[in-house]
Amino acid sequence: MTDIDTLVNNVFSKEPAEPNKYNVGLEPYDGEDPITVKDIFEFLLSFFTDGASLVYGSQNGVVDLEKWGQEEINKMIKYCESIGFTANIKVYHKNDPTFRGISIQDYRRMPQNGTNLKDMKFPLSCKNIVCVISFDYYKNK
């Protein structure tokens, strides 16, 4: 089991903990390249999707985002806060006219220098909806 698998299992096996409960250790080891914003984003994306699969997935791990309401979204936000990050989740219905005007730049094509974590977005598509997810560092409110 990888470190992220262990973290996901520990965090998502119970109700969300208080903010900053878990230290995810996103510092590079001696001799490793520095961790980039893209690395952090991809880590959080894996954490989020793997965790959602554990909590809300079918027997084969498939998550039906169309069944999500504000309760599920809030719970996923709390899970992310428990590792020191906030998830921003926007739900769009594909047949909504306002959705057609939305442009989501692929985070993999964003410049590495000067890009903030909160500016990186990833769309998760499911049948008639698209959830656009981004992350930021948790700040006490």
Image (cartoon, rainbow, N blue to C red):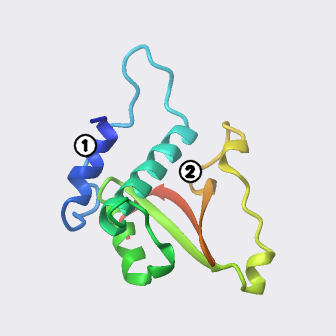
| 1 or 60: nearer the viewer | 60
Q: Quadrant of residue 28?
A: top left
Residue at 62% across, 57% down = 121
The image's mark for residue 117 is 2
Q: What amino acid type is highlighted by mark number 2?
A: Leu
For the image, the number of numbered tags is 2
Residue at 30% across, 43% down = 5
Q: Which residue is mark 1?
A: 6
Q: What amino acid type is highlighted by mark number 1?
A: Thr
Q: Position of residue 55 (x, y in %)?
A: 30, 66
| 53 or 106: nearer the viewer | 53
- 96 shown above or below 10: below
- 37 shown above or below 129: above
Label 2: state its secondary structure. Answer: helix
On-image quarter of the N terminus: top left
Q: Position of residue 134 (x, y in %)?
A: 55, 60
Q: Earlier in the sequence, mark 2 or mark 1?
A: 1
Residue at 61% across, 57% down = 122
Q: Residues within 10 Å of mark 2 (few under 14, many from 20)?
A: some
Classify residue 40 as left or right of residue 82: right
